[in-house]
Amino acid sequence: MSLSLYDISVPVFINAFGNLAEILKKGEAYADEKGLSHKDLLQARLIDDMYPLIAQVQRASDTARFAAVRVAGIENLPMADGEATFAELQDRIERTVAFLKGIDPSAMAGREEAEVVLTTRSGSTTFTGKSYILGFAVPNFYFHVTTAYAILRHKGVPVGKMDYIGRSK
Amino acid sequence: MSLSLYDISVPVFINAFGNLAEILKKGEAYADEKGLSHKDLLQARLIDDMYPLIAQVQRASDTARFAAVRVAGIENLPMADGEATFAELQDRIERTVAFLKGIDPSAMAGREEAEVVLTTRSGSTTFTGKSYILGFAVPNFYFHVTTAYAILRHKGVPVGKMDYIGRSK
């Protein structure tokens, strides 16, 4: 037995989105309990020039979708960044998970050494499928999920490590 | 070609520790530039009951070592949590990386379905090698590395996403 690029990305992302959805529910419940504005919590950030909570979730969604899109060469499902409520963020997560669940594992098979070009404002970086998933997509994905957690934690929401790791094994 | 449990953990951790070492150097340089106490920065945290920077690095070290130890069944290299300076944290990272570099990939081979029992204060959880690496070790590792980054970012250290992702591909 061995692992495929699909194994180490898509199901992992789906699992983490399930945990993130629960963490966001705890954030929403905490805001209600403490009489905090949902908007203020959704726009909370760790420092002025860093993405707020809502954008951390959007970037996690993008990172997960593009991991499969770029490796498998399938069409992306574009998602506008219009979310402004907890319900809309949950809907974004649901649509992202539905997209991920629809990916055929065979579409990512044998792509370990295929060229993957990542183009951003600062230029292009060429990866292999393997280096892109292991060296960019997975760490970037966990970066945004952890930062979403960290923002809520920083604001006092009673979440713990096990909410992030999840319990379903 | 396919991926092994070793491929998706040990070299990934080694790479991330290289990035974390550079991030910590930027933190130290920022403290010196701004006349901030090293101790205050090392003890900074996002909220009172969360681990400070120094412990985030220690937990990343533990998570990485134990991933290999538990899957390969090799002996751990214990590390006391006595670090109190940036230099000592860099040394902890160097010793962790040296330990990881010494792991023979074959020791982790074929362990995808082997039982891995994780015992903590709250009880025992039984994983397979695959579910332990993908569902616990990797997300937990990135949790602590990202939180170390987030603490420094929160305190004003001028680090960016590319410091976390790294540039060597």
Image (cartoon, coloured by chain):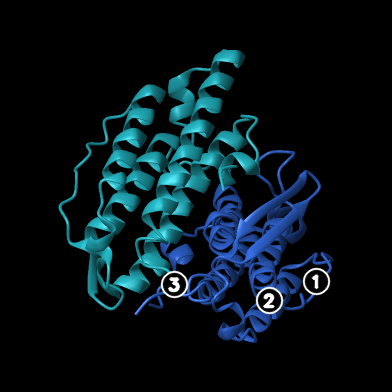
Chain colours: A blue, B cyan
Q: Is residue B40 visible?
A: yes
Q: Number of callouts in the render?
A: 3
- CA distance separating discs 1 and 2: 9 Å
Residue beneath disc 2: A96
* SS type, badge 3: loop
Nearer the observer: mark 3 or 2; the answer is 3
Name the residue: 44% across, 72% down: B2
- Name the amino acid, label 3: Ser
Nearer the observer: mark 3 or 1; the answer is 3
Q: Are marks 3 and 2 in contact (CB under 8 Å)?
A: no
Q: Quadrant of residue B95?
A: top left
Q: Is residue B85 visible?
A: no
Position of residue A81 in the picture relative to residue A45 (left or right): right
Q: Locate residue A71, reporting x and y percent.
A: 64, 70
Residue beneath disc 1: A79
Name the residue: 59% across, 52% down: A147
Name the residue: 54% across, 27% down: B27
Which chain is mark 3 on?
A: B
Q: Residues within 10 Å of mark 1 (few under 14, many from 20)?
A: some
Badge number at residue B2: 3
Q: Locate residue A82, reporting x and y percent.
A: 84, 66
